[in-house]
Image: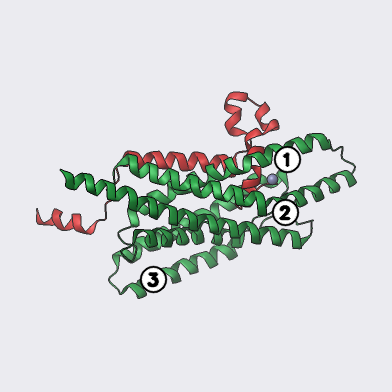
Chain colours: A red, B green
Amino acid sequence: MRMSYTRQLLIERPDIPRVAIGILVAIMLFGLFSVGFDQGQLFSLVEGKEAFDSNWLHEFVHDMRHAAGFPCH
Amino acid sequence: MRSLPFLLVTLVSGAVAGTILGIVNLGVVEPYIDKAIQLETQNEIRAGENVNTDEMAGYRIWQKSGEIVGGIVYGISLSSLFGIVFAYSRNSLPGNNVKVKAILLASIMCFVLFIVPSLKYPSNPPAVGDPDTIYYRQSLFVAFLVISGASALGVTALIKKINQTVSKKVAIACTIYGAIIIVSYLAMPSNPDKISISMNLVEAFRLVSAATIVMFWEILGATYGTLWNRFNRQNLKKVTAF
Ligand SMILES: [Zn+2]
């Protein structure tokens, strides 16, 4: 009993539900990939191979990608 | 804090900071990008390539229109990460003022996730990167980013376990983190691409774009702290009303 009480004091637990943390992880990964790394992969899921040539998403976030220090062209 | 206000604080502060970043970049970073693309196009024409200037102009409009949306997506992604780190660390950050804590954490994250990686792999305007090396450059960039982020997390976990004064803990953390970064900096290969446009332009671009990203992080921290205070107080009121 006493053990678990001191443990609770020592271990810092966020009082934020796990679900919220999970949602944020998903948003972060998806967002950073779109802005920082996509070379046509995301749109190719619906557009097929053509997406790698037109590269719409890449071009759309292109200037922010350069400005935020991600590797580009 | 409950899920909904927490998510709201996190996403809204990211969207606010990202929107401001996009607007500021349209004003101060775009001129350098325009200049670099101009030089790139001139080089291509000189090399005998067939450049469709109308198509280029269309692309530029599309690219510029994405600056603010890009800023918002960038802002929300980083504020998501910030929100997670803040949720876990806010009780260990020094001081009583949530806003000060949030700004401090934002500054640390800016240093670890932006400034340190840019020392090794600085940002470049268009016309510098070779499309053939993009996946290699992305891997190097991610590797350095992960090294920096993971060692910062690692040393934080480590100093939490040792029994020392706060200033000693900070000194130990900085020494270990610094040592890991110096070793990785020396060990990792450099950016393979040669810079063929004016170095002045490249350096001005790096300086201005880095300044706007630092600005972004500070706005994110300040907005986050402010919103957190507001929503948390509402929560407290609800609890005491029962
Ligand atoms: Zn580019």
Residue depicted at 77% across the width and 47% down the height: B37
Secondary structure under tag 1 reads helix
Q: Which residue is mark 1?
A: B60
At label 3, counting other C-alpha atoms closer than 10 Å, the crowd grade (few under 14, some 14-19, many 20 or more) is: some
Of all chains, the one bearing label 3 is: B
Label 1, residues with CA under 10 Å away: few <14, some 14-19, many ≥20:
some
- Residue type at mark 1? Arg
Which comes sooner in the sequence, label 1 or label 3?
1
What x and y, as percent, mark residue B82? Answer: 43, 51
Residue B58 placed where, x, y %? 75, 35
Question: Which of the pair A53/B3 is nearer the observer?
Answer: B3
On residue B32, the disc is 2
**What mark, if any, has residue B170 been given in the picture?**
3
Q: Earlier in the sequence, mark 2 or mark 3?
A: 2
Q: Is mark 1 within 8 Å of ligand 1?
A: no
Identify residue type, mark 3. Answer: Val
Element class at badge 3: helix
Please give the chain letter of the residue carrying mark 2: B
Residue B86 in which image quadrant = bottom left
